[in-house]
Each structure stands twice: as structure tokens, then as C-alpha cells.
Amino acid sequence: MRVVLVAARNPLNIGAAARAMSNFGFRRLRVVNPYEAGFREARSAVGASALLQSAEEYKTVAEAVADCTLVVGTTAVRHRELQHPLRRLEYGARLIRKQLGSSRVALLFGSEKFGLSNAALSHCHWLMRIPTCEENISMNLGQAVAVCLYELVRDGKAPRPAEDAKRATSVELERLTTTLLEVMRTSGYLTRRPIADVEERMRRLVRRLILPARDAVVWLGILRQAVWKLRSAKPQAG
Amino acid sequence: MRVVLVAARNPLNIGAAARAMSNFGFRRLRVVNPYEAGFREARSAVGASALLQSAEEYKTVAEAVADCTLVVGTTAVRHRELQHPLRRLEYGARLIRKQLGSSRVALLFGSEKFGLSNAALSHCHWLMRIPTCEENISMNLGQAVAVCLYELVRDGKAPRPAEDAKRATSVELERLTTTLLEVMRTSGYLTRRPIADVEERMRRLVRRLILPARDAVVWLGILRQAVWKLRSAKPQAG
């Protein structure tokens, strides 16, 4: 996979593109006719200065994509008479991923002001667009590169909810319920505001918490201490 | 949906975040303690200057998320002992989309240098990370905002109203946290088992509950009654 920036004007954007590449595990940056020669020193390439230093520089798009078997252009435009198939990023990225194992793919980004010229587009097999809003279709170059590369590495494996904490067991929840009821009794809550079917209600209340196991322990400790203190204070209060 | 930038240093990044919001159809930007006062004039907010002009400014994270029922923090960190559930963007965004129809969601981004502080994180229900490479996990702020918002609108699915019960707002959760701390103090819990950073820990504990709004009222009532009783008993006990 080669990321090809064509006629980029702002060195900070080239650096930002390099940073996004490094964030998502892409290594090969190619630059065609950059507006400023000093782009390799762009401070925006945080953690990606080596990648930026080793960027390959070309005079023409033709040379920059010469060794690639799939060339995909990016565009914000939807309605000007595009001569190419235009795919939404989600779908286009899927097609690119299928190719990546077996062939060299170039992903082209145009200049900040004008995007890819018709001449540059003519080197592309097809085009891809990020699903931006009609009101503001044009993205910043560095952000567009980040979003496209993210989509390419996204969802390699099915996203798992596995990082969630272990849930409290019913036994633990029942202990919590009992202690909560005890707080309500010893604090005088139930005297002031009697509740019908209070045990069932509180049992449901506690179950609705969706409580991680280790948190259940903390809650139980706090409530037990409160009960202990409330009980020990009772004789004096009563 | 509210995008909340906490302690952002570079006005260009705030402008870039505004631009990405406008690209993907988000309108409400909130800014907490920006490093530079002049951020509203950031030239990077191409096509999004109105959005940037109308950004709401806050002194604290608490105020910035007060009216939100789901608060999600973003982080690049994976291994430091995070106190929150951590979800990959693909999966986390799906959860957020489910909420968007029915509730106000805040998505927090930290400063360029340090990310979100532990204090800021303690206001979050859970955290989300962009699947970046180990070699360079930290993204540029504007690019990170773009990638997260892209994932939220990706795949053309409109946010559906959730079947879930209405969630407690951050203000309600904060009230509950304060009262819980008061229970811990007045019951002697903290004397017996001192806890470092107890306020942040309890704030996270309460956020992990996934508390329906009507239940928050019940819990608050029970804990307040306990505090009242514990306080009134105190002189005799001490």
C-alpha cells in the first residue's frame, strides 16, 4: 500500500498524513510535486519523522503509481461528471483490502484547494469518497488520510465487547439488596416513606444497576459500614 | 451529541475538530479550559467557522457534561491501569449510536500532550480507543476527532431511539456521588479504610452503574436519609 499525496500545499498536512500512516501501520509515503520543498521537516509528523524522511518524491503521478496494480483516487466531489466508478469509503476500502495481500495499491489524495486534477484522476482505476455531509463535503487533507486509513485497518477482527468487567453474581446482588434494605430500615427511611413490596422493589433496583463484580464488593462494604454505624447509634437516638 | 475538547492547547486543532464535526454533521462543540483564548478565530475551521463561533466554553468537565446522560472518554492508552471499561472505537461507536436517539451523549477528547486527566476521566461512563498501532498509538487531536465522528456516521445508519430507560444525567450522578461520599465519611468508613483519590474513585464507581434516571432518585433518597440519620446520631456516638 502506497499513500500518494499529489501537489499538497501545506507541509503540516503532509506531516499529519505521515503521522496518520504511522498510527495505522502504513509505511510508504509518496509525494508528487509538493508545494514546499521543506516538507520533510514538518513538525506535525509526531512519531513519524522517519517515515516522512523516507518519503519518495516524484515529478508526475504516472511515475508515482508506475509499480502499482490498483490505483484508487479520493474525492469529495459527487456530482461533477466523474468518469470513474465512485465508491463510498466503507465499500471501497473492502475492495482495497482484498487486493492488498497480492498487489501493490496506491491511494491518491489531491491538493488542499483543488483535490485531484482530471489528469491525476485519469491514472485511477476508480474513486472513493468519504461520506461527508452535503453542507461541508471537503475535509482537511490530514484528516481525510486518517479517516481512509482507519477504514482500511478497521474491524480486522469482529469487535468484541470482551473488555468489559465481570458481572456480579446473583448471590452478590442479593447480599447487596439485603444490606440496602437494612440501611433503609435503620436510617428511618421506611418509616418516613413506606414502600409496598419493598423487598421486591429493591431487588429489582439493585439488578438494574448492571454491577461489575469488584464494584459490588465496594458498595457492600460502604452500605455495611453505614448499617453498623446506624445500628450502634440507635440506642441513643431511640 | 456533544464533542467536548478538554484543555486543548493548539487552536488549530480546535478548528480542525470543528471542521471534522461539520464534515460529519455534528453541531455542538464544547470547550473546557482551552489553552488559548483566541481559538474561535482558528483558520483551520474551514466551512465550520459558525460552528466554532458558537462553541460553548466551560471551566470544568463537570459543567461541560452536566446535561449529558452518557459520557464517553477517548484515550490512546491501553495498559496503564484504566479504571473504566475500554472499548474499541468500532464497538463503542455502536453503543453510542444506540443512545443518540434518546439521550444526550458527550464525547470527550483530552489535551494534545497528556490526553484526559484522571479527574476528567472520572466523569466518564466508559472509554473508547481508536485501534492504532503499538508503535505510534497517539493521534493528532483533529485527526482523532475526525476518525471517531466518521465511525459514528459510517455505514449510513441513522441513530435509532433506544428502548433503554432514560439514563440519569451527569448532574444526578454527581449528586449521588457526593451523597455516597458523605455516607462514607459520616459512617466512619473512610476512617477505617482510607482510600486514596476517594472522590475520583467514587465518581467512577457511580458512573459504572448505568443508572436509569428514576432509580437515581430512589438511591439518592435512601443515601440522603442515611446521611441525615448518621449526622444526627453523631454527637451521641462521638
Image (cartoon, coloured by chain):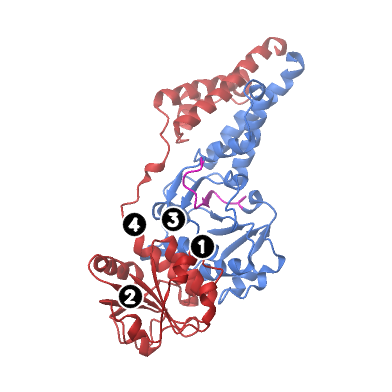
Chain colours: A red, B blue
Which residue is label 1 attached to?
A: B145
**Label 3 – label 2 distance at C-alpha:** 23 Å
The x and y percentages for residue B207 are 54, 41
Disc 1 or 3, which lies upstream in sequence?
Answer: 3
Q: Nearer the viewer, residue A10 or B220?
A: A10
* Left or right side of B178 for B139: left
- Give the position of the C terminus of chain A as an image quadrant: top right
Q: Nearer the viewer, mark 3 or mark 2?
A: 3
Query: Which SS class for mark 3?
Result: helix
- Reading the image, the residue beneath label 4 is A155
Tell me the residue that label 3 is attached to: B135
Q: Is residue B23 visible?
A: no
Amino acid type at circle 4 is: Asp
Q: CA distance from mark 1 to mark 3?
A: 20 Å
Chain letter of mark 1 equals: B
Dot 2: within a 10 Å radius of its alpha carbon, few (fewer than 14), some, or many (20 or more) residues? many
Which chain is mark 4 on? A
Identified by mark 2, the residue type is: Ala
State which chain disc 2 sits on.
Answer: A
